[in-house]
Image (cartoon, coloured by chain):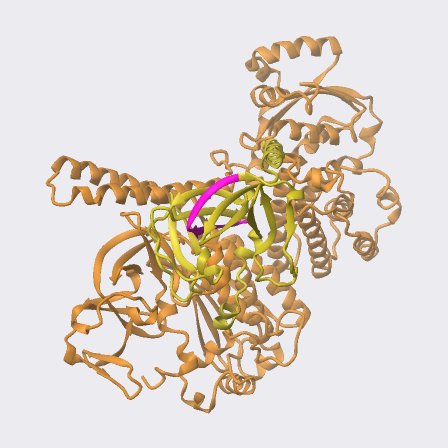
Chain colours: A orange, B yellow
Amino acid sequence: MSEQYMNDPMQEVFIFETSQQLEQMEQSVIKTEALGSYPSETINEVFRIMHTIKSSAAMMLINNMSVVAHTTEDMFYFIREEKPQYIDVSTLSDLVFEGIDFMKLELDKIKNGYEADGNPEILITKIKEHLKILKENNNLTDSQVVNNEPVKEKYYISSNKAAKISEPKTYQTILHFAEDCGMENIRAFTVVHNLKEITDAFKCIPEDVINDPDCVEIIKRDGFMLQLKTSETQAKLEAFFRTMAFIDQFEITEINELQEIREELNILVDDEEIMIPQLKNPALEMAPVKETLVANGNQSQSMISVSVEKLDKLMNLVGEMVISEAMVTQNPDLKGLVLDNFSKSARQLKKITNELQDMVMSIRMVPLGPTFFKMNRIVRDISKKLGKEINLKILGEETEVDKNIIEQIGDPLMHIVRNSADHGIETSETRILQDKPRAGTITLEAKNAGGEVLIIIRDDGKGLSREGILEKARENGVVGPEAVNMTDTEVFNLIFLPGFSTKEAVTEFSGRGVGMDVVAKNIEAVGGNILVESVEGQGTTITLKIPLTLAIIEGMNIRVGESCYTLPIMSIKESFIPKAQEVFRDTEENEMIMIRGQCYPIMRLKDHYQVKTGATQIEDGILIMLEGETKSTCLFADELLGEQQVVVKTLPKYIQRMKKIEGLAGCTLLGDGNISLILDVNGLTAPKRLKTNNYQSL
Amino acid sequence: MVEEFDEFDELELEEDDETEEGKYLTFTLDNEAYGLEITYVTEIIGIQKITEVPELPEYVKGIMSLRGQIIPVVDVRLRFGKPHRDYDERTCVIVVELADITVGLIVDGVAEVVAIPAEEIVPHPDLDETDSRQFVRGIGKVGPAVKLILDCQKLLEDNTEESYNQEA
């Protein structure tokens, strides 16, 4: 069953939409909670979303989700209709979050092809309990609302029962769905499905929305036409349509005789303009529709959603094109020829290629906002559980990074924020004793810096304890007695080693010692790095440096013997041809060079990677000064081949699985079709040194 | 749309099963002939320029570009612990794809594609399923000649002790 459902486009849309709505709801509720009361907008929003999810889940036969949504909807229905005075905002939010979590989990199950089998009983009982308490606290009798609750769905209408008694009337409605919503037939079906609950009889055009392949077009062009017989008033029908997702516009007219409808319909299909004068009260009707439109954020009509897979392919293609462009313009056959016209065209081609590349990159850029906002929830949960007061400040959430990178940094970010909230921020009592503001603050900031994005997680908690870390490190045998001489930065970096946790107590949220090393690994995987700064007693700042994009970098190609390597231009400080007498060695035969009073170690790539060919005399080659995250190194190579934009390709999986090669970031195809290995400057300069302590003395 | 694609894939696979069942690509190393299930083979190309990658086991010669795709190349001679032989015009690279991994295998020369029915394949005399370094899965009889049938999976696994030790 689940197998068969896997690639169901209807299901895909359901999952996508539902998770988006849940996300939206989560954000609004978090915002609301900070206010301390529920404004009517939020109540309406939760109600609307829950209602939509309830129906669509029922349509997808996912009953447990539907039931949870239904119960939550009931609760909010009560809140909205009765406007109770006393609402326990925090408990209410807890329940909503629990519901959201439950539904998210079920969605995940469905996405991965499992049955959505979570048991909603406990949650539902809880919600119902809460609803009861709400009612009791607000001195309302259960009789009117509760008794009806489980039996039948109620809309705005039911508070005014008088209307129900009135004679059934016939209405005609034309629904227009939002232009880009897609799958109009399924939307229409949802409407029909829901209508069944409030109408006595109805008819729709096109008739068979599910099986008629042409109906999507018809609905798109002419709208979805419904004639319905109901005892509800027109206002209530309007309200009903407004709760439905993706309805952009609708028009409702009252009709007296069926015969009339038929005629009118025929005219309508032919010419929509006739319809306008027939509108009962156009001004009144159009205005609220526009409002909901804005509220729903559905104005994004000039947007389309594209699968990431397609974008990846496009990006690969552009990458190939950049390479081919280099292959053509730097073709060895052209060497020494004077080709004015060719160069002109080649320049033009290069310009267009670059623009195309920028464009593709910008398509893939996504703002960090949603990822950041997710942290709200984490901070909220932790502060609530641990009884701490924590404010989360978010800055620069509009900063954009590549889609792939966003995916990679979500987990690490969550981990760091958790750590800060859990271990960093003290309890309110401790904070007051230390003359700090009662509530702790965690700041999440993102900003652009050159070709990189900086994500800064700052807390004003107790900071990292140098001694604590060192002690722990000694215990684990990570460092020896010489560690006393380590700089603060080096000490703080120890927390990224596997199995390292200074916290004895393992809490629900963090402290298991698996974490920071995973964080470091994930960040490194996208070519970024982490800096930790901390002042004990004042707080910790963790900075993630993330490359803007993974795919294309400005590179400098260098040659060592017959091998070619590429260095990111960003990390090259300078290059020069050394004189033999400038180079000296220490007692361990480590080569060094003094430049402007500063001493730099020399790394011979040839020896480092055991390249069989290449210059051995220092004056036959060139030294390239590289600036790593913590150290600078002079790299010795045979010659510089020139600057080029290179498309970063990862090393084949086969090799990645075999071994992580220190100092290699990937590989790239050069203009001549050869492969060059891309060097990772931080990998070359930083690690290994801790173990051997070779450069400790520097 | 998605569904359509899936069906299409399945259809193709079924066809593949029919036509490729029991067919082996045979190649030579020294005097022996080896067989590789043809399902895994995507193409055969001549030897190309290989870029060395440092710090890898000796049998991984490096990486090469296959129309823009970068694939690792393994020298099968070295993989089997045979001495290196200089590459010549008969040297070929068999590109195999297993799961999501694509690897080029350098062999002395490619012979032909033969059908060896399952009943013509006898098990290796001292087959030990647990020995991950035993590459020969069985011995196929083709007329008077024998072909050593290779286990593609094991061929691509990184199961040499020293590479683990290097890692540690």
Residue A254 showing in the rendered view: yes
Q: Residue at x 69, y 57 (%)?
A: A93
Residue A399 showing in the rendered view: no
Task: Residue lying at the far front in this picture: please name it.
Answer: B144
Say which of A45 and B84 sits in front.
B84
Say which of A381 and B96 sits in front.
B96
Q: Quadrant of residue A330?
A: top left
Q: Residue at x 53, y 70 (%)?
A: A517
Q: Residue at x 57, y 36 (%)?
A: A293
- The image shows residue B43, relative to residue A386, as above or below, that is above
Instruction: Estimate the x, y position of residue B103 in percent, counting from the top left.
Output: 47, 51
Q: Residue at x 33, y 86 (%)?
A: A697
- B111 sits left or right of A593 in the view: right
Instruction: Estimate the x, y position of residue B54 in percent, counting from the top left.
Output: 38, 64
- The image shows residue A438, relative to residue B43, as above or below, that is below
A209 magenta-colored: no
- A114 sits left or right of A633 in the view: right
Which span is picked out in magenta? Answer: B100-113
User: Can you say which quadrant of the picture contains the N terminus of chain A?
Assistant: top right
Q: Quadrant of residue A261?
A: top right
Q: Quadrant of residue A234?
A: top right
- The image shows residue A583, relative to residue A186, as above or below, that is below
B101 magenta-colored: yes
